[in-house]
Image (spheres, helix red, strand yellow):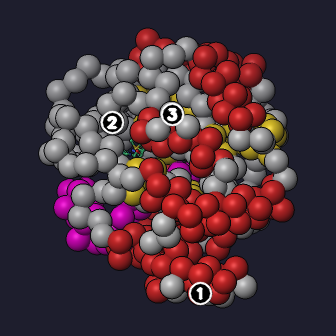
Amino acid sequence: MFNKAFNYIKSGGNPDFDSIKALLLADEQQAEDLFDYAYKIRLQVFGKAVYLRGLIEFSSYCSNLCAYCGINASIKTDRYRLTDEQILECADIAYGFGYRTLVLQGGEDHQFRGKRITSILNMIKGKYPDIAITLSLGIHSYEDYQEWFAAGADRYLMRFESSDDSIFADLRPNTTLVRRLEALDDLRKAGFQVGTGNMVGIPGQTLDTLVNDILLLYKLYPDMIGIGPFIPHPATPLANYPHGSVFTTLKELAILRIIMPHVNLPATTALGTLSLDGQMRALQAGANVIMPNVSPESLRKLYAIYPDKAGSQEEAVATHNRVLATIARAGLEVDWGRGDSKLR
Ligand code: SAM
């Protein structure tokens, strides 16, 4: 079954449910072939280049109640918000390391919306006009998205998390999958390079729902796809569920690289959290982006969306050096440019 599906997909066949399922079922040996082929494709499209994005986690306050997330509004924990000065210091650090993309990510915090985001964008772009800015702050109005794009934001990340609307509804009260997809559409219309993705092993997910996640990604054909294993946080209702599989996540990454050769695919921190060599293996299975954290070391552990997040005890320079070493170990090289989407 695997060989038939693999040959079909390699020959450029349209991804369908049965072939994607057969690829996801690959055993260890078959998966090696899948990873090698995905790596070959990434070499054809990107050469050895890996793009770096400096991640600034600007606020751990959140008004949402996502059942999987360790900073959801119902959890009693210490929280922080970065000041504008602190955000600019993080940008300085990232720029000093040579990064030409920043990702501003946070909980959905009423103090970080509308004009406040516009003024942060003006502040960063005023000082560093050559840096690309990615926002990741959830659902906002189309008008806000337009204003932020006009103020210089280039890209926006918003995972749909699960393509199954009942899983989505169970995990994310007060919103719907339809609304999330509508917001992704708004972002595209506003002009952003858009990133989305799913979690692997989220409670309720079956192999079939994961296949549908991949098919939805193919249908959306975004500029970037962020996927990572679910990791249970002890203070959430999902505390006792098992974490998602690193192996399955790597297989999903490889499949995505093969069916969407030009998409930007990060080796996510969640992979690096579950497995010491998880990010390196992701790079060898088709990933071409890493997002090193440049947030202040003293606050990192408060952005605990899941426990023991890789890098949460490090200073930015240690994270930077670790990421450079991972890229070198994978036999790849940093591309110090902005790493814009090749799909535009
Ligand atoms: N609030 C924004 C949003 O929801 O898009 C951005 C921040 S949110 C914390 C970033 C991502 O973290 C989510 O899209 C989700 O996939 C991931 N995440 C949250 N909790 C997680 C967990 N327990 N395990 C793995 N990933 C998780």
Residue furthest to the front in view is: 29
Residue 165 screen position, x and y as percent: 28, 72
Left or right of 108, for residue 277:
right
Residue 131 screen position, x and y as percent: 75, 36
**Label 3: which secondary element:** loop
In the figure, 326 relative to 238: above or below?
A: above
Disc 2 Cβ-to-ligand 1 distance below 8 Å? yes
In the figure, 69 relative to 284: above or below?
A: above
Task: Point out which mark residue 4 bears.
Answer: 1
Q: Residues within 10 Å of mark 1 (few under 14, many from 20)?
A: few
Cα distance in 3D space between marks 1 and 2? 38 Å
Marks 1, 2: nearer the viewer: 1
Cα distance in 3D space between marks 3 and 2? 16 Å
Q: Residues within 10 Å of mark 3 (few under 14, many from 20)?
A: few
The quarter of the image that holds ligand 1 is top left
Q: Amino acid at mark 1?
A: Lys
Q: Amino acid at mark 2?
A: Tyr
Cα distance in 3D space between marks 3 and 1? 33 Å
Q: Contact (CB < 8 A) between labels 1 and 2?
A: no
Left or right of 304, for residue 50:
right
Of residues 314 and 59, the one nearer the viewer is 314
**Label 1: which secondary element:** helix
